[in-house]
Image: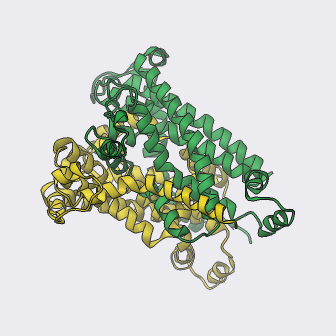
Amino acid sequence: MHMIKLKNNNARFFVFLFMLPSLLIYLLFQILPLAGALYFSVMDWNGIAGSPVTFVGGKNFLEVFQNKDFLIALKNMGTMVIFSVLFHTPIALLTAVVINTKCKGYRMFKALFFVPTVFPLSAAGLMWYFVFMPTGAFNSLLSTVGLGGFVTPWLVNQSTAMNTIVFVNIWAGIGYYMVIILAGLTTIPEEVHEAAAIDGAGIVKKFFWLTVPMLKSTLTMCIVMDIIGSVKVFDLVFAMTGGGPNGLTNLPTTLLYNETFKYKHMGLGSAIGVVILAICLAGTLISNAVVKHKSD
Amino acid sequence: MKKTKIILMYLFLFIMAAIFAMPMLFTLLSSVKTKTEIFSEPFALPKIIQWKNYVEAWTGANMSRYFINSLIQAGATVIILVMVASMAAYVLSRFSFRANQFLVIFFMLGMMVPMHTVIVPISYIIGNLKLTNNILALILVYVAFGLPFSILVITNFMRSINRSLEEAALIDGATYFQIYYKIMLPLTVPAISTVSIFNFLGAWNNILFPLLFINDKSLKPIALGLLNFNGERGSEYGPLMAAIMITVAVPMLLYLLFQEKVESGLAAGSVKE
């Protein structure tokens, strides 16, 4: 089992030829833009091809953190991250454990919970947009069951709009984490459960003293992935509110899009992009540490 | 298991199922109802099935165009991606040279880059290369963002393939290209299908990149065309719901056909996040 050494020109040429396409595409459309993001974040530019790009140093970052809209977006991001983490992994864990009993109909339930994961988020967002419309299905459902007092334009009302989007994000993600946890569950050997059963452990006890500890690294991974994923939510907000009412449901991602394409603040936009990158990098580093810990 | 436990379990499953099915059921039902029916009784069956909503969405609102665009864009992304990623993976998994390790890590770097971070520079690059409204540019951007995960998955898979077959072929005088094409690719199909499904869904579902540099309506993908339809004719609820169903049909079909593969493929993508 040894690697092929590049001892003749033929092999060298082959390696060059086979690496070239992927390297070219990768450099041009991933590495160059990444470098460009860092570059533009310290520049001022109005977004029109041909107009001057001037160096302004850290001004964009200063502006970003003094910008009221960005602070709102950051706060929304915090809400998104906290509630996603609070609901995604615990509900996904519970669902996975129940589905793992292979009870009657478990395949159908699993498919139902997972299928939103494959939808375009723009389509999923639009589904819920119509459900939560002022005259939509949810309000009509509330009235039918005698909860008419709660009827409100969910995505227009300033105090409910963000939470509604957070709810949809939770709905859209549970299946994904459920499948990851299900894969983790299959690695727990059957004998462990049998041993626990012989010792007389009940279902609840087994859950907290056996399942959760044995899945610790999987669950930690889910939470870290969830944090990074929630930071990157864009499509849902774009489809459901576009950041409104009054920019109150903007996330850093949608604010970045609006700043750059509506107001042509390219430098400011890039600075927001770099902040998003920094948050995701921190998340990735933590996740790597977790994985390393897992393999030790 | 005790009876109460089973009852509790199903109670939980049914509550979850109700929440999960609600928007999908509402959309499905509404897609074949009249506007009045949608609002008067959201969860009732239609009196007459309004197939004309689908006709209106498909032809009147141009969903057919968007649908074909997405098929082409996602399909071409997968084909190019599988080609270039498997070529790189063959080299990285079989040839020893100084830059090998560096290249592996270099490609992994891309997994950490959120698409949103590059919104400004990528628009700048595309604009300056005069590639706005160019489908190939969109596809190459998808390929670039799919490369890290795809190379990782295919390289790891190729590393696990036994080398005796290739070594025998080399002795018989086969070229490296023949070995790649005739031996490695067929053996790598499981990894390639994972990568294909993952990236097909990624391209089908993406709206950010087409938002940035596809302005021409006739070139837009379905996930974005749907939002356009809503923006322009937001009160035609029946046809809009039909359009949503058309948009989710392909991902849903893919999932129903390849359930295990889609689940494991997306879970493998968890490395990417």
List x then y, in percent, for residue A283.
Answer: 61, 38
Q: Is residue A13 left or right of residue B160?
A: left
Q: Is residue A222 left or right of residue A127?
A: right
Q: Report the chain shown in green.
A: A
Q: Is residue A160 above or below residue A23?
A: above
Q: Would residue B37 be visible to someone looking at this image? A: yes
What is the residue that sits farthest to the right in this orientation?
Answer: A199
Residue plotted at (69% across, 65% down): B2
Residue plotted at (41% across, 67% down): B254
Q: Is residue A258 left or right of residue B96?
A: left
| A237 vs A35, nearest the viewer | A237
- Give the total number of marks visible in the rendering: 0
Query: What is the quadrant of residue A28 in the picture?
Result: top left
What is the residue that sits farthest to the front in this orientation?
Answer: A146
| A44 vs A103, nearest the viewer | A103
Q: Report the chain shown in yellow.
A: B
| B222 vs A138, nearest the viewer | A138
Q: Describe the colour scheme in one phrase.
A: by chain
Residue plotted at (38% across, 28% down): A255
Residue plotted at (81% across, 65% down): A197
List x then y, in percent, for residue A59.
Answer: 46, 14
Query: What is the quadrant of residue B52 in the picture?
Result: bottom left
List x then y, in percent, for residue B241.
Answer: 25, 54
